[in-house]
């Protein structure tokens, strides 16, 4: 009987355990899997909360459909009937800039305009800003290597497209300082568009045409009726040979003659393989005594704080809001990155007479305490909408060092981590720190690590 330990029961660890379990069943491999999770619940950042008549998310709120791996898992679990898309909305969101909301131009390729019509009509850019964006059609290709995402967008489309469109959108996804993101790590497809088509806008137009053909159900984002946490629960209960150990932190590791030894307040235990599905710093802490070459690049991955504040309001007397939410451009004096009108974005999250609003914070603003975050959320919302009634309920979730920042050099750090990891038999490092911060990517990471171990384990005596 082979034994695998998965440390960390977030989405990546749960996916790894699920795919190990399914693969062992399929191949008739005698395998025991133990998941060690320090918290009393599974899911990590995935946390769907039912609070009276409200359904909210403490962490992630949606998955993008064009990265299929999360929804593949949903389908395997037989949950496709529970998948919901966002409610139709035109425009999908506004950008708050210069003291007012501007509709997002239609046809964005992630954060880049793909059509000239909406770009010409948008109130987000001045006539000069539009002319500068149009230069993208004529500018030569830039350098092949990595560059800060802010520099990349400004080089192709100009400062206004960056400040008023790409930066607020990117900050809403990655938090932190969007300028410093590694273009190659965070948006490799945009760099590839420049390489292939030279113009980002023309390349985006072609990419969007292809993608529209693949998109089911119309909406770009998806969730489950009762929230994303449903997938964690379903994956955990679908397994047969996984021992889910909650409240079981791993505090120390050792490796000796082909076996990984785990230690914690619960005792000590040996395993044939080890999946670390942890934030990079937690993984570094465990691996540092064994291998400085792996710990060093792990500690170099920067993390930023994030927080969400969800508020419930009576619709009666609340100003009319359109679309799914509003993103706030830098320089508007706000501390929140933006707001999502949750009950307008998803069906069934609040009673008809109520509005559920979520504020997203990152960077230094997310370091505020709970009361400070609530005050900041209310003040920023009033800045956008005018005076508001008291919320009938509020829920604040802080994620300290919650978001890895893929800054320039990220791919090189991951390459160094991989090179050092490969020297340790049966060790896998997965999760949001490495090959994509979104839920689809961490599920793919878990699935791929499981496949590698299922190949490796039968070979070892
Ligand atoms: C506010 C917010 C909003 C987001 N929105 C979206 C979104 O809309 N769409 C999207 O796709 N992604 C979103 N993300 C990103 C996504 O949620 C994460 O990338 C993903 O959930 C990370 O999963 P993970 O398993 O890698 O890590 P985690 O969820 O961090 O799991 C790691 C687990 O390891 C456990 N652990 C730590 N140390 C130990 C130890 N020593 N022993 C045992 N266990 C330990 C932790 O308790 C935790 O459960 C968002 C993230 C945040 C914070």
Image: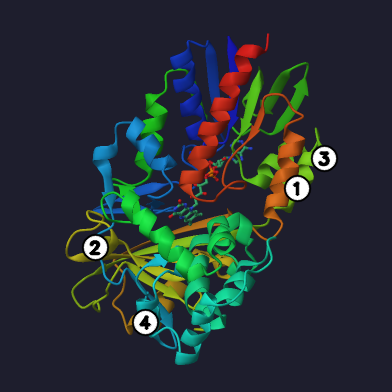
Q: Nearer the viewer, mark 2 or mark 1?
A: 2
Write the residue at 64% across / 22% down.
273
Q: Which residue is mark 4?
A: 101
Question: In the rendered image, is residue 153 in sight?
Answer: yes
Of callouts 2 and 1, the N-terminal one: 2
Query: How dense is the environment of label 3, judged by Cα within 10 Å: few (below 14), some, or many (20 and up)?
Result: few
197 vs 8: above or below:
below
Q: Which residue is mark 1?
A: 297
Write the residue at 31% across / 61% down.
342
Cβ atoms under marks 2 and 4 closer than 8 Å = no
Q: Which residue is mark 2?
A: 88
In the rendering, which numbered label is found on residue 83?
none
Q: Is residue 368 left or right of residue 252?
A: left
Helix, strand or loop for disc 2: loop
On the image, the x and y values in percent for residue 253 come to 72, 29
On the image, the x and y values in percent for residue 61 come to 39, 54
Q: Is residue 300 left or right of residue 12?
A: right
Helix, strand or loop for disc 4: strand
Helix, strand or loop for disc 1: helix
Q: Which residue is mark 3?
A: 292
Query: How dense is the environment of label 1, judged by Cα within 10 Å: few (below 14), some, or many (20 and up)?
Result: many
On the image, the x and y values in percent for residue 66 come to 40, 50
The span from disc 3 to disc 1 (Cα, nearest Å) is: 9 Å
The span from disc 2 to disc 3 (Cα, nearest Å) is: 51 Å
Of callouts 1 and 4, the N-terminal one: 4
The span from disc 2 to disc 4 (Cα, nearest Å) is: 19 Å
169 vs 1: above or below:
below
């Amino acid at each position: 009987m082979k034994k695998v330990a998965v440390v960390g029961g977030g989405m990546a660890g749960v996916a790894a355990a699920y795919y190990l379990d399914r693969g062992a069943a399929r191949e008739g491999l005698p395998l025991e899997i133990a998941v060690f999770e320090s918290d009393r619940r599974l899911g990590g950042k995935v946390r769907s909360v039912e609070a009276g008549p409200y359904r909210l998310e403490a962490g992630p709120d949606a998955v993008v459909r064009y990265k299929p791996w999360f929804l593949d898992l949903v389908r395997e679990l037989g949950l496709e009937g529970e998948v919901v898309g966002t409610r139709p909305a035109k425009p999908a969101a506004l950008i708050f800039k210069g003291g007012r909301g501007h509709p997002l131009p239609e046809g964005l390729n992630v954060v880049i305009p793909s059509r000239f019509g909406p770009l010409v009509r948008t109130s987000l850019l001045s006539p000069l800003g539009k002319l500068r964006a149009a230069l993208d059609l004529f500018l030569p290709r830039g350098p092949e290597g990595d560059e800060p995402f802010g520099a990349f967008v400004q080089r192709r489309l100009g400062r206004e497209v960056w400040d008023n469109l790409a930066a607020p959108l990117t900050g809403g996804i990655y938090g932190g300082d969007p300028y410093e993101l590694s273009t190659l790590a965070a948006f490799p497809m945009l760099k590839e568009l420049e390489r292939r088509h030279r113009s980002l806008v023309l390349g985006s137009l072609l990419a969007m045409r292809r993608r529209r053909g693949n998109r089911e159900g119309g909406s770009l984002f998806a969730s489950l009726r009762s929230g994303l946490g449903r997938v964690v629960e379903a994956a955990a209960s679908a397994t047969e040979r996984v021992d889910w150990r909650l409240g079981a932190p791993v505090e120390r590791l050792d490796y000796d003659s082909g076996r990984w030894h785990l230690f914690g307040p619960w005792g000590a235990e040996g395993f044939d393989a080890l999946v670390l599905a942890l934030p990079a710093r937690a993984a570094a802490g465990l691996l540092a005594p064994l291998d400085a070459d792996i710990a060093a690049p792990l500690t170099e991955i920067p993390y930023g704080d994030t927080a969400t504040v969800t508020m419930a309001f009576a619709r009666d007397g609340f100003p009319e809001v359109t679309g799914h939410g509003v993103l706030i451009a830098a320089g508007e004096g706000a501390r929140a990155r933006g707001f999502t009108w949750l009950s307008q974005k998803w069906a069934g999250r609040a009673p008809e007479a109520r509005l559920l609003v979520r504020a997203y914070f990152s960077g230094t603003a997310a370091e505020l305490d709970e009361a400070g975050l609530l005050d900041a959320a209310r003040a920023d919302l009033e800045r956008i909408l005018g005076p508001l009634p008291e919320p009938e309920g509020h829920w604040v979730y802080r994620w300290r060092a919650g978001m890895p920042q893929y800054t320039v050099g990220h791919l090189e750090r991951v390459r160094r981590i991989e090179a050092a990891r490969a020297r340790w038999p049966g060790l896998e490092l997965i999760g949001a720190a490495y090959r994509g911060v979104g839920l689809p990517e961490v599920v793919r990471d878990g699935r791929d690590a499981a496949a590698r171990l299922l190949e490796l384990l039968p070979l070892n005596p």
